Image: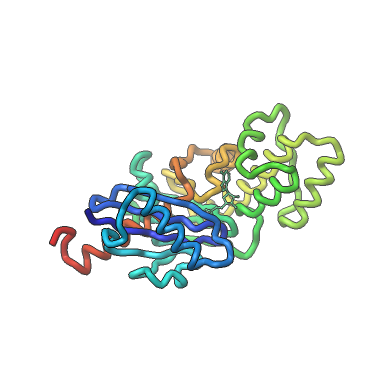
Amino acid sequence: MKYFAGIDIGSTNIKVALCDAEGNLTADHTTPTGSHFHKNALAAFDKMLIDKAISRDDVHYITSTGYGRKLFKEADESVSEITANAAGASKVGEAYGKVRTIINIGGQDLKVIVLDEEGHVINFAMNDKCAAGTGRFLDVTARNLELDVDELGDCHVNMEGVPVTINSTCTVFAESEIISLLADGNGRDEIIAGIHYSIARRVARLAKRHGVEDLVFFDGGPALNKGLVLALEDELMRDIAVPKIPQITTAYGAALLAREAFICEEGSLYE
Ligand code: ADP
């Protein structure tokens, strides 16, 4: 059996994915990036193979992507996150329709990618200079409210009041604003929803500047947060598609590109 691997070394998490000869997602694994990118990526890759009892010899091509992609020396090629994300989102998005706009929120960046009818990238915008509008903003919010980041979505959905307006656009100032809002008696859930709307407004502004076409596909770890999804749907005034494992779309895309590169080099999947 032939397999193809995608390794996405993000600023916060390393995601690894494997596809089979037909391009089906076979395995995936996510682990914190930490400070030893290469060692941690290799460990994540090995764990994914061991969990599925797949031999390293059956992996015929590896494509790395993401912020730390150049550090994964075992890769046969490396591609940009934009290319890998577009490939993964187009494939996963087939279950929902034809993806034309991808919104990817990572641990420290925010991307909007616009695709044409054939799934080719025609435009993209990236903001990796500021933590507002990224997963980092959610991590800081959770820490300030003594919650885990995966609890924020439920807090938003179960809110009894209305979202509090957050005025600070900077993560550092928002931290002190959260504390002032709590001191003024505002509810925790209403503050969380306010943070989600503040991120969603920022994302929607960037997306609208580059043209939002349906189907809008939302991926990256923060897409696991259903409160943020609701806020983004409100701000974009449309439904958005969120895959089941949104953080691995880019790694899966890299695995699909590994498969394509193998076919291109070898001429066929079957010798
Ligand atoms: P990167 O590719 O930049 O490393 P990810 O796409 O892995 O980033 O996203 C990381 C962010 O996703 C974290 O900073 C966190 O805010 C958010 N996140 C991760 N897991 C969850 C979860 N279970 N629920 C909600 N948000 C999450």
Closest to the observer, 119 or 78? 78
| Residue 81, x across and y down, in percent | 45, 62
- What residue occupies the far top of the structure in this picture? 160
| Residue 108, x across and y down, in percent | 59, 59
Closest to the observer, 231 or 225? 225
Closest to the observer, 9 or 88? 9
| Residue 129, x across and y down, in percent | 62, 65
- Count numbered badges in the picture: 0
Residue 130 is drawn in which quadrant? bottom right
Q: Residue at x 33, y 50 (%)?
A: 53
Taking the image as drawn, is residue 102 in sight?
no
**Image quadrant where one finds the C terminus:** bottom left
Q: Residue at x 48, y 46 (%)?
A: 218
Residue 229 is drawn in which quadrant? top right
Colour scheme shown: rainbow
Instruction: Answer left or right for 63 relative to 151.
Output: left
Instruction: Answer left or right for 41 relative to 199.
Output: left
Taking the image as drawn, is residue 101 in sight?
yes
Q: Residue at x 33, y 43 (%)?
A: 94
Instruction: Answer left or right for 214 relative to 125.
Output: left
Closest to the observer, 227 or 28? 28
- What residue occupies the far right of the structure in this picture? 184
| Residue 65, x across and y down, in percent | 43, 64
Instruction: Indicate whether 243 appears above or below 23.
Output: above
